[in-house]
Image (tube, helix red, strand yellow):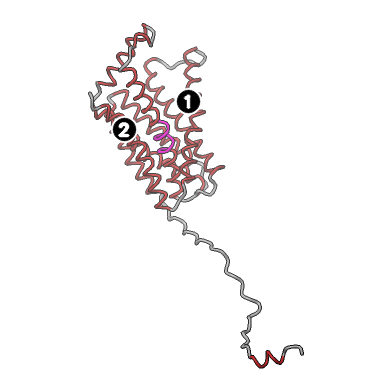
Amino acid sequence: MEILYITYPLAVLLIVGMAYALGRYLKGRFGLSWRLYIIGAAVFLLSQVFHIPFNIVITVLFQRGTLPPPPPEWQVTFNILFLSFSAGIFEEGARYLMYRFWTKEARSWGQGLMLGAGHGAGGEAMIFIGLLLLVNFLAMLAFRHSDLSGMVAPDQLALLQQQLHAYWSAPWYDSILPAVERALAIVLHLSLSVLVLQVFTRRKIYWLGLAILWHAFANAVALYAASTWSVYHSEAALAVVALLSLGIIFALRTPEPPAQPEVGPPPHPPHLFTPIEIEADSDKLADSRYS
């Protein structure tokens, strides 16, 4: 479908646009700088530096038999739970370290939202998902207009052709689904950021455990719906999670601290001596001359 030439890049633009718009809104609404947004994005990327290799290592250990694999009837459930909890532990653990060491001053509700926006919108949506979608589109575009027989091995040619056919024959609304999914996931990340913030505002570590459980639950619900039914059921489940996340966000809302008045330059010190104006008299000036 020719419309896919428009809708696939449009999904990328929507993801990048809403990620920037959210950060811009929070910046203006709470008078914050982009620094917190950037830190949130960097922390997400840092979490993936450890999260992705961990998943790969554990997968290899299962394949080699080093770790006992689950029974076949439990394999799908085990994979969903493993992926969900590993995401929750690494991402919320990184978020905790962020609050603990790198953003010690960020203790307000608005600052928590800004960090969550950077994590979910700037890091995961804009850089991670948006970039992957763009690279995938460009690759599929190049493959569609190329002679594949000279580019891949014969045993891989049929698989690549199937992938190309599925990609370019998808309904146009399927190509927009990643933008919808990201919008819902961003709301989840805002709630997770506020949950981890409670560790430091309420001084109770169990809030970190709640954030990990909420993250794992959201991922598990979406993965289970996608693997059992369809991607549309997965998006519907994520929409319910997003609504519940909104409830968490506003249930934990606290008043913002009063804005600190801007400190201007100190006033000029008063003059120690006030100059006295003396009227000049020509006769007195003449008398004061040396003879």
Q: Nearer the viewer, residue 243 or 291?
A: 291
The secondary structure that most of the magenta stretch takes on is helix
Q: Is residue 1 left or right of residue 85?
A: left
Circles 1 and 2 in contact, beta carbons < 8 Å = no
Mark 1 residue element: helix
User: How far, Cα to Cα, is label 1 from label 2?
Assistant: 25 Å
Amino acid type assigned to the residue bearing label 1 in the image: Ile
Residue 278 lies, with reference to residue 109, above or below; the image says below
Rendering quarter of residue 22: top left
Q: Secondary structure at mark 2?
A: helix
Start and end of the magenta stretch?
120-128
Residue 97: x and y in percent read: 54, 39
Place residue 181 in its image quadrant: top left
Residue 68 image offset from top left, x and y in percent: 48, 15
Where residue 36 sits in the image (x, y, percent)? Answer: 48, 45
Say if 93 sits above or below 155 in the image.
below
Query: Of callouts 1 and 2, which one flags the residue occurring earlier in the amino acid sequence?
Result: 2
In the displayed structure, 166 sits above or below 40; it is above
Report if residue 122 lies within the magenta region: yes
Q: Amino acid at mark 2?
A: Ala
The residue that label 1 is drawn on is: 52
Identify which residue is drawn at 34% across, 11% down: 148
Residue 170 - label: none
